[in-house]
Image (spheres, rainbow, N blue to C red):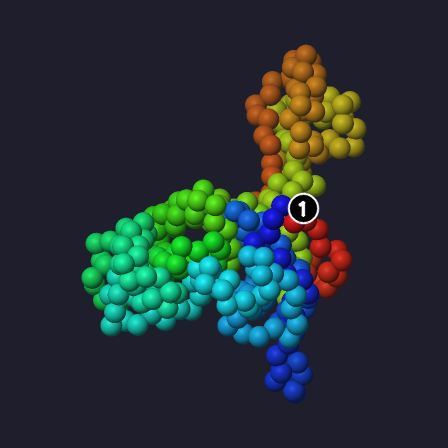
Amino acid sequence: MSHAIDLAQVQKTYKGGLFGSRVHALRGVDLKVGEGEIFGLLGPNGAGKSTLVKIMMTVIRPSSCSGTVLGKKVGDKATLARIGYLPEHHRFPEYLTSRQMVEHFGALSGVSKKDRRRRSMELLETVGMKDWADAKIGSYSKGMRQRVGIAQALINDPKLVVLDEPTDGVDPTGRRDIREILTRLKDEGRTVFLNSHLLSELEMVCDRVAIMVKGLVRTHGTIDELTTDQRHYTITVSESDKDRALSGAKDVFGDAAELVPGRAGVVRIDTAQADRVQPVIDKLRGAGVVIHAVTPFRPSLEDLFMQVVQDGAGGETPGAAKGGRS
């Protein structure tokens, strides 16, 4: 896999902590993002997510950093012109209209006057802001400003789009629209790097995710890869049939089958493979057990996030981090 982002040992230390101590915002981050994928970076407040993004965008200097962005060393000026960026706490001039603002950023990115005029209106239509193109930004809601922010991030026709909290303050309809925009960007062959607190949004749109805790990437991969060990099936039967159901499941799975505490008539089978559940179903039906439901279970991104954060808070070492291939 070719990588749009390939970072190694990114560290950032700030001076001026409590009693003059140093604050380690990033402790040696390794991160790879494949070309043409939507990649989500998440973590609790203070994990170092925005610091990492700002290092990639040369907003702040790292204490140490090696690696590449779009195949060039981090900070390469020509490469920065091929990146679209929406900061988390952006401040657009409120006296400009959205059309003027998007064209302004196009000029800063070296887009020709003809192209930026054409693209600005196309992009404002894409993000649902065409009807407000000539209204001043000062009159916009936060969600409207986010939409315009995405438009300005695309004005230079970027190969890599970096969005820091793009759905912050956006209503459910707006979040759906933004998901559709992100999917369209992927279909066009662009790489999208998202930093967000909205886990449900990331789960719906991202190909892969990474979770940061205390300045380290603790785990990374697809949701399926990261939850393989916790995926299972449950078989629901009548309370009166639970013992026969458990016995039949144990005949096939042994100790990998058990009753779920607090859930009457529910048997858990520790496998993620549907074909391995079929013999249990056949056995129960042959024994006359009425099956009410067979349900696959996969932890949500929120479940995974909470587990990783709790492990990280407990002092888990970087070597314990897991994940799929980068």
**Mark 1 falls on what kind of element?**
loop
Q: Residue at x 62, y 83 (%)?
A: 15
Q: Residue at x 65, y 87 (%)?
A: 20
Q: Provide residue 322's location: percent of width, then percent of height.
A: 70, 51
The front one of 40 and 203 is 40
Q: Residue at x 34, y 66 (%)?
A: 107
Residue 208 relative to residue 256: left or right = left
In the rendered image, is residue 274 in sight? Answer: yes
Q: Residue at x 60, y 32 (%)?
A: 296
Q: Which residue is mark 1?
A: 324
Amino acid found under the numbered disc labelled 1:
Gly
Query: Compared to 182, does 102 lie above or below?
Result: below
The front one of 20 and 234 is 20
- Classed neighbour count for the residue bearing mark 1: other residues with Cα under 10 Å, few (<14), some (14–19), many (≥20): few
Residue 47 relative to residue 254: left or right = left
Q: Provide residue 298's location: percent of width, then percent of height.
A: 60, 39
In the rendered image, is residue 301 in sight? Answer: no
The front one of 296 and 88 is 88
Q: Quadrant of the N terminus?
A: top right
Query: Looking at the rendering, which quadrant does residue 114 occupy?
Result: bottom left
Query: Looking at the rendering, which quadrant does residue 156 occupy?
Result: bottom left
Q: Provide residue 131's location: percent of width, then percent of height.
A: 21, 54
The front one of 241 and 222 is 222
Query: Compared to 131, does 215 lie above or below?
Result: below
Query: Looking at the rendering, which quadrant does residue 169 occupy?
Result: bottom left
